[in-house]
Image: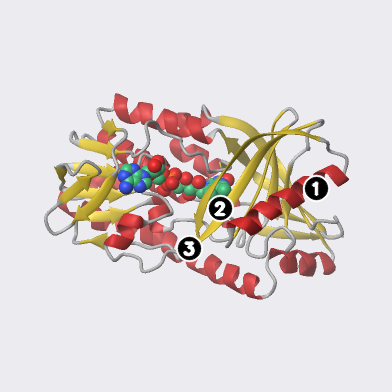
Amino acid sequence: MRIRVIGAGVAGLSFALAVTAAGYHDVLVFEEHSRVGVPKHCTGLVSETTVQAWGSIARSCVVRKFRDYVVRDVEGQSVIYLKLLEPVYLLDRVKLEEELADAVLSAGGIIKFRHKVRVIHPHHNILIDHKGNHIKYDIAVVCEGAPRILARSLSLYSKPRNLVGIQQLISLDKSPETVTVYADRRISRNFFGWCVPVTDKIALIGTADLHGSNAYAGVLRILHVLEREGYRARGILERFGGLIPIDLPRSLVANNNVLLFGDAASLIKPLTGGGLYAISRVFHALPGILKHTDPKKLPHAFMAEISMFKRKFKLHSVIRSALTALGGYETALKVLSATGIHSIKIGKYDDLLTSMKLSFR
Ligand SMILES: Cc1cc2nc3c(=O)[nH]c(=O)nc-3n(C[C@H](O)[C@H](O)[C@H](O)COP(=O)(O)OP(=O)(O)OC[C@H]3O[C@@H](n4cnc5c(N)ncnc54)[C@H](O)[C@@H]3O)c2cc1C
């Protein structure tokens, strides 16, 4: 069974690792860049559940652990504290991909770097790379991330919808204590902003918006808020970003032998933009699926697993759209704060809505 994976991001590498570890011998991953982890785009905040799914691979990438978030507006007039009953971890995202890539290679998979897949012919089971080479496959797994160029060429999407996320790693004269989420239209009309303490006096600030220029302005505003509140920025160490899908998740198979996974399938938590949770859960479930499924039926069994997330994220997606129409996360914060809510206990980070318990002043 020739399994060909397009994209050595977290989704492609997790899929390749699960199938190679399950004894599939002919697994090739194509990656257009010369190494994994580039370009950098992700913050790397994940739940305990997500870390558990990848096990020691993710544990070795943990940078920090958080038990509290502060959600506030720019002035700090509306503030709500989130108490995380399940800890949230900041992962070194580049390291996570490096560890997954090492595990794929150790299990017998092959990663072909500097190989961009340009075309998929699902009726002939052929991929064509940037040099025009024809590559045969039995199953092709498209893990190309949010741009969804191949997915579009297969007519699996008409027009993907994404937010543009922009981040800056900054050096400060003192360390912020915990994660701050800015729910304020002056930072983003469509999403929220964040300031995540990384290591001593180093923080990652960022936001996302439908337009990159607005996201960039939002990041500058976060810097301004930090400075106004007594944090002196000593320098910008890194700038990076990427796209965050905001379509409903898709469980799609083309011609029975091409399937989508990760951001390519829009497997993103609609309220927070987190994509690692669903990837890690599917990775965790794959050994069971592989054990009980005829290899020829693998794409459909895999997609049945993804349908679970599709159902789960649908409600969250509707709520996100309603929130955006009503003025975004800022309105939600103001309404909750005005009703006297001081803090919210979050039982499950990946299921904010059903696991929250409100505490009033
Ligand atoms: C600003 C920002 C912050 C985020 N923060 C978080 C967070 O805190 N927590 C969280 O859970 N998620 C977060 N996410 C989302 C998370 O980063 C993604 O869900 C996750 O990286 C998706 O992994 P992927 O493998 O599907 O795609 P990607 O990571 O995009 O990987 C796709 C890979 O495919 C390769 N590729 C693409 N096309 C081809 C081709 N034709 N041929 C060969 N190779 C190809 C690319 O080079 C890339 O290596 C964030 C995203 C952004 C943009």
Report the residue that reaches farthest toward the left.
124
Is 25 on the left-hand or right-hand side of 213? left
Asked whether the viewer can see residue 121, the reply is: yes
Question: Given the image, on which type of amino acid does mark 1 rest?
Answer: His
- At horizontal 68% and vertical 39% (from top left) the residue drawn is 66
Residue 206 x/y as whole percent? 65, 47
- Confirm or deny contact between disc 1 and disc 2 (CB under 8 A): no
Specify the amino acid type for callout 3.
Lys
Quarter of the image that includes the C terminus: bottom right
Picture quadrant of residue 209 = bottom right
Q: Mark 1 — residue?
A: 224
**For residue 312, which numbered disc appears in the image?**
3
**Residue at point 23% right, 55% down?**
258
Residue at image mark 2:
350
- Name the residue type under label 2: Asp
Coloring applied to the structure: secondary structure
The number of numbered discs placed on residues in the rendered structure image is 3
Circle 2 — which element?
Answer: helix
The picture places residue 160, in percent across and down from the top left corner, at 42, 64
Q: Does residue 41 lie above or below 301 as drawn?
A: above
- Name the residue at 85% across, 65% down: 340
Residue 323 at what x, y percent from top left?
64, 70
- Give the Cα separation between the discs numbered 1 and 3: 37 Å
Asked if residue 132 is positioned above or below residue 257 in the image, the reply reads above
Q: Report crowding for label 1: few under 14, some 14 to 19, many 20 or more residues within 10 A (C-alpha).
A: some
Dot 3: element: helix
